Image (cartoon, helix red, strand yellow):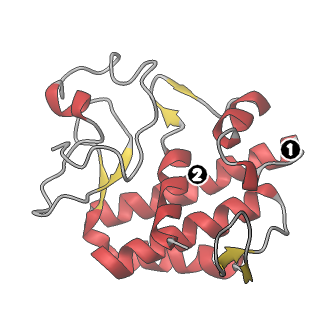
Amino acid sequence: MNLASYADLAIDLVNTQRPQGDDLRDLDGLRALLAHRPHLGGRIAHRDLYAMRELRAQLRAIFTSAARGDEDDAVERLNTLLIHHPVHPQIARHDGHDWHLHFNESGSIPDRYAARAAMGLAAKIADRGIGRFGLCKAEGCERVYFDTTANRSRRYCSDRCAGRPSVTAACHPGEPRVTATARDGAQ
């Protein structure tokens, strides 16, 4: 199990809110966020939507604290999420794969999402450091990212923002989601 890959959950959720709109404005938006994650699917209700919006705010606060250099606050916020959304690992073997770790599938969708996202961020911090959490520097863009460049030079969430930092309203309409593993070359 690559725990760090779960950091994409945090980035994807935080980036659902932009100055141009909120992708979690309704249940269809939440379904779209979860569509390519069948292990996090299930029946969703309005309470799940509200919980995911709250989780999004908590995750954004972690990135904001880290980006302003307040590592202690960012880690305290992340530790709070880890405490409130504990993971329950279990060993599984399926689909021709040998024994490997999985997280227990119990709990609400927001709880499962929060536990995985928090574990992913914690793994990223442990592996690469909290200084790699970033907020896009392009004017009008509020997306977050995780800098995976060798020289810690990434300043933008995507190549589009890196090439057009002064464009506000044109930032990302219709562009596919950007994850921690997407294009490490974005400066």
Residue to which mark 1 is pinned: 44
Residue 149: % across, % down: 18, 58
Looking at the picture, how far across and down is residue 103, in whole percent?
A: 71, 74
Q: Is residue 14 left or right of residue 73?
A: right
- Residue drawn where x is 29% and y is 21% of the image: 168
- The quadrant of the rendering that contains the C terminus is top left
The amino acid at mark 1 is Ile
In the drawing, does residue 131 fall left or right of residue 22?
left
Residue 42 versus residue 78 in the image, above or below: above
Q: Position of residue 154 (x, y in %)?
A: 18, 51
Q: Residue at x 56, y 69 (%)?
A: 118
Residue at x 43% of width, y 19% of height: 173
Q: CA distance from mark 1 to mark 2?
A: 17 Å
Q: Nearer the viewer, residue 94 or 35?
A: 94
Q: Element type at marker 1?
A: loop
First reached walking from the N terminus: tag 1 or tag 2: 1
Q: Residues within 10 Å of mark 2 (few under 14, many from 20)?
A: many
Position of 101 with respect to 4 (left or right) is right
Quarter of image, res 86:
bottom right
Residue that badge 2 annotates: 56
Q: Is residue 123 above or below residue 64?
A: below
Asked whether residue 129 appears in the rendered view, the answer is no
* Amino acid type assigned to the residue bearing label 2 in the image: Arg
